[in-house]
Image (spheres, rainbow, N blue to C red):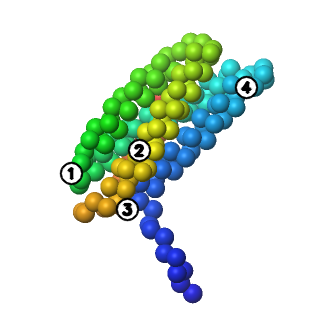
Amino acid sequence: MPNSTKRAAPDACSLLDTDHRNVKKMFKAYEELTHSRAADVQQKKRELANQICTELTVHAQIEEEIFYPAVREAISETDLLDEAEVEHTSAKELIAQIEAATEVDDKFDAKVIVLGEYIDHHVKEERNEIFAKARAARGLDLVAMREQLAARKEELMEELTAAA
């Protein structure tokens, strides 16, 4: 019997949103670690922060290389994309500071938490505005783009883990 509530095929936006949800869980886990008194908490925070930075770096890169340029061509209002790219630049600056930090101290925690707040804001705008406009745009094959994004993401993750 066919399913009467037909769901849309997974597309580029759903792939990007899955990334958003995954990194949100990591930020929550990091925040929980800031209240931990465990002996190895500093090491756990460093590892989780590195994982967050890797995920966000790859996510931003696939958006900038594939998603944003395609959406920019397909929609007339591009100010949201300009803002998103500026937000990426700010996030990358914080990521660089987190990755370069030698101490996992209160400043380190603050940087990770502020990065999480930046990302929360960015995700809301993408989810509510950019994704809606992308899905409404004519001639933008978001289902095919999902495959492109997934392949590029896998490639970048392999490069970053090989370099680590």
Callout 3 touching callout 4 (CB < 8 Å): no
**What x and y, as percent, mark residue 135?**
35, 60
Q: CA distance from mark 2 to mark 3?
A: 21 Å
Three-letter code, disc 2: Glu
**What x and y, as percent, mark residue 118?**
47, 32
Secondary element at image label 1: loop
Crowd band around label 4 with a 10 angstrom C-alpha radius: few (<14), some (14–19), many (20+): few
Which comes before the other along the chain, label 3 or label 4? 4
Residue 128 versus residue 58: which sits nearer the camera? Answer: 128
Secondary element at image label 4: loop
Secondary element at image label 2: helix
Q: Which mark is residue 76?
A: 1
Secondary element at image label 3: helix
Which comes before the other along the chain, label 2 or label 1? 1
Which comes before the other along the chain, label 4 or label 2? 4
Q: Is residue 126 above or below residue 116?
A: below
Q: Residue at x 43, y 29 (%)?
A: 91
